[in-house]
Amino acid sequence: PPRRTCPTNGAARHAAAYMPRRLSESLVTKRNIGETLSRPACQPFERQAQASLREHADLLDLTHDAMFVRDMEAAITYWNRGAEELYGWTAEEALGKSALELLKTISTVPREQIEMQVQRTERWEGELVHHRRDGTPVVVASRLALQRDAQGEPVAILATNTSTLDVDRIASA
């Protein structure tokens, strides 16, 4: 049988999916073929994965840009502090919701065209109109990046949005 990975809880598996390739690979046991680690032996790997995920999330909370991750069905799976500040919803309120519905996204480019470009080039940049919790519109410079799994299948899209009002204020200062 092939090498076995350490059985992990959902949080650690999720963390491994979003970690740099080398760290994710370090979660694979380096034992003889057929050997598995006992549950207590796996716990350091889980703690390492969870700590690394927390560190990365903490770094993303430092930016003033609104950043969120959505799955391929548009459900929000990550929502940073910048998104909370720009849009008015807490992470707890946003998680699991459709990004398109929550933000009432408006674009001059058809959504299908944006999705096709993201699938083809793994990137898209443009202006969107989103709506804050209080209903006010905000124009954002948006950048989308596609994440693929080990088999090359699309799994998530990272959206990084900057209010164009903020950009205009900086430019006029």
Image (cartoon, helix red, strand yellow):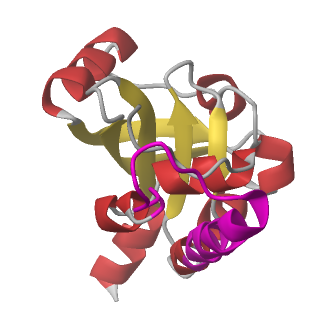
Residue 86, compared with residue 107, is above or below; it is below
Residue 113, compared with residue 21, is above or below; it is above
How far from the left and from the top, in percent, is residue 114? 29, 22
Q: Tell me, yes or no, whether the highlighted magenta stretch contains residue 62.
A: no
In the drawing, does residue 166 fall left or right of residue 121? right
Magenta span:
27-55
How far from the left and from the top, in percent, is residue 74? 57, 25
Q: Tell me, yes or no, whether the highlighted magenta stretch contains residue 28.
A: yes
Residue placed furthest toward the left: 121
Can you say which quadrant of the picture contains the N terminus? top left
Residue 39, compared with residue 119, is above or below; it is below
- Residue at image position (26%, 14%) is 113
Q: Quadrant of residue 152?
A: top left
Residue 109 seen from this side: no
Question: Along the line of sight, which residue is nearer the eye, 95 or 141?
Answer: 95
Residue 48 seen from this side: yes
